[in-house]
Image: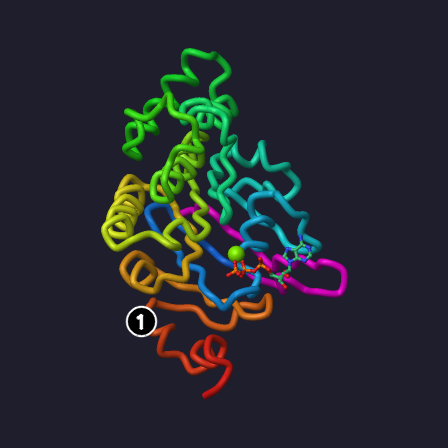
């Protein structure tokens, strides 16, 4: 089967720091790839390179066989790249609906169609009844769902989730885990950065571990967590 997302040899440097060092990955439709690693490992920077928010110094990114390496973020979004941001930054004064309309307009030019799409994703994430509230009124769990709705509003085929579960209480965490499983079951390809191992173990088909910019291990979730290099990268000791 053709891969949904394929990255080859992605390298990103900030001045003297190699934030992402020659990382490759493949993701198929209906699969979840977990991306883990200690703070500063380069996970978010890799996301930014794959979605076009930072330039890669080397490497290629293909979506469903199409090379998107040179496309800006909004064009990658139109190609089916949906993403959340680690620090969600909704337009606080705008309503929930208006926040989702912004990305919805990337794929729907007409206002009525964009509104239908936005309401549809708000329905999916369970925020439809709050469509006219300003974003600043939402609690953390709902802000995360709004962030997810904004990612879904581009009608993604590949979804990039950057720590959407961090800080959630146990019931909200369970809800988020089943929601993400549901998206996978609908056929989305999902790349998920997460520090919450419960979510990684439960959801990931495959896990990649990064440390200091480089891929240091990959494989099935439980196998990867038992890997000596991975334990050392997290604990800094054996
Ligand atoms: N815009 C930037 N300019 C300079 N350096 C950056 C920039 N963004 C990230 N870095 C550096 O790149 C490295 C990787 O950071 P990144 O945010 O990708 O890590 P991360 O794995 O997402 O960490 P965390 O788990 O804390 O979110 C770090 O050394 C960071 O300081
Ligand atoms: Mg990060």
> In the image, is the residue at mark 1 within 8 Å of ligand 1 by its beta carbon?
no
Residue 194 percent coordinates (x, y): 41, 58
Q: Position of residue 99 (x, y in %)?
A: 46, 27
> Would you say 233 lies left or right of 205 here?
right
Q: Which residues are magenta?
A: 1-23
Tell which quarter ligand 1 is in: bottom right
- Report x, y in % for residue 55: 68, 48
Q: Residues within 10 Å of mark 1 (few under 14, many from 20)?
A: some
In front of the other: 72 or 105: 105
Q: How many marks?
A: 1
Mark 1, secondary structure of its residue? helix
Query: Relative to 129, does residue 208 appear above or below in the rendering?
Result: below
On the image, which quarter does residue 115 sit in?
A: top left
Where does the image place residue 86, in percent across and percent down from the top left?
A: 49, 49
Question: At x 29% / y 28%, what residue is drawn?
Answer: 123
Foreground of the two, 113 or 131: 131
User: Which residue sits at x=61%, y=43%?
Assistant: 52
Residue 41 quadrant: bottom right
Quarter of the image with the C terminus in it: bottom left
Most foreground residue, 93 or 175: 93
Most extreme residue toward the bottom is: 238
**Is 227 placed above or below 85 here?**
below
Q: Is residue 62 left or right of residue 97?
A: right
Reply above or below: 53 against 166.
above
Q: Which residue is under mark 1?
A: 222
State the residue at coordinates (39%, 54%).
166
**6 magenta-colored:** yes
Main SS, magenta region, reads strand
Residue 233 in the figure: left or right of residue 113: right
Q: Nearer the viewer, residue 32 or 48?
A: 48
Farthest residue to the right: give it. 15
| Residue 133: quarter of image | top left
């Amino acid at each position: 089967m053709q891969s949904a997302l394929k990255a080859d040899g992605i390298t990103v440097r900030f001045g003297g720091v190699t934030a992402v060092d020659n990382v490759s990955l493949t993701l198929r439709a209906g699969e979840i790839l977990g991306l883990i690693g200690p703070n500063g490992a380069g996970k978010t920077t890799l996301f930014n390179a794959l979605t076009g928010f930072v330039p890669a110094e080397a490497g290629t990114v293909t979506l469903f066989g199409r090379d998107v390496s040179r496309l800006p973020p909004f064009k990658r979004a139109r190609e089916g790249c949906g993403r959340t941001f680690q620090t969600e930054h909704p337009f606080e004064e705008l309503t929930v609906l208006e926040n989702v309309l912004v990305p919805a307009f990337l794929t729907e030019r007409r206002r009525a169609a964009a509104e239908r799409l936005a309401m549809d994703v708000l329905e999916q994430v369970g925020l439809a009844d709050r469509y006219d509230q300003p974003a600043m009124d939402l609690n953390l769990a709902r802000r995360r769902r709004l962030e997810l709705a904004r990612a879904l509003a581009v009608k993604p085929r590949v979804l990039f989730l950057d720590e959407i579960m961090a800080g959630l209480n146990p019931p909200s965490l369970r809800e988020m885990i089943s929601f993400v499983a549901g998206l996978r079951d609908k056929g989305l390809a999902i790349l998920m950065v997460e520090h919450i191992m419960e979510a990684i173990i439960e959801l990931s088909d495959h896990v990649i571990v990064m440390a200091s910019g480089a891929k240091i291990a990959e494989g099935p979730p439980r196998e990867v967590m038992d890997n000596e290099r991975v334990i050392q990268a997290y604990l800094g000791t054996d």
